[in-house]
Amino acid sequence: MWDLTACEQVGEPLTGHDGWVLSVVTTTIGGRPRIVSGGEDWTLQVWDPTTVRRVGAPVVGHADKVRAMATAVLDGRPHVVAGSQDGMLRVWDLAPGGQVGEP
């Protein structure tokens, strides 16, 4: 993470993906800021930027690299829409960490 005002790195790099990180979005879950990363390892990972640690286990379900993501609030809950190289879009409810509906 980078402090754009000071042009300095904040803390240590976030590590946990097995391979390249291909997409990153920010959101708020339960009133707390979160970073969501999608990777070459077919997973989404949720991070707490204040503690610089991963929150929970990686989110799995894609059948290939996660290349694109966007955030949305649906029915008052944070969601991430993730596009994968498997040709599918999946919607994830990040509060419980489950997929919403079919791809």
Image: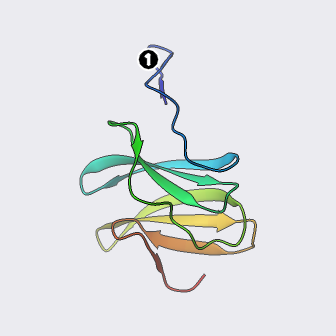
Q: Is residue 74 left or right of residue 39?
A: left
* Residue in view at x 31 percent, y 74 percent: 75
* Residue drawn at x 28%, y 68% as measured from the top left: 76
The x and y percentages for residue 44 are: 55, 59
Location of residue 96 with respect to 69 vertically, above or below = below
Looking at the picture, does residue 51 appear above or below residue 81?
Answer: above
> Callout 1: helix, strand or loop?
loop
Who is closer to the viewer here, 89 or 74?
A: 89
**Residue 9 position within the rendered picture, expressed as x and y whole percent measured from the top left:** 49, 21
Outermost residue toward the top in this view: 6
- The residue labelled by disc 1 is 5
* Front-most of residues 7 and 37: 37
The colour style of the image is rainbow
Name the amino acid, label 1: Thr
Q: Name the spot of residue 96 as percent of width and height, x first.
A: 35, 71
Say whether residue 73 is left or right of residue 18: left
Left or right of 87? Residue 15 is left
Q: Answer with the quarter of the image where residue 48 lies.
A: top left
Q: Position of residue 21 (x, y in %)?
A: 65, 46
- Which residue is rendered at x = 51% and y = 38% of the image? 14
Quadrant position of residue 72: bottom left
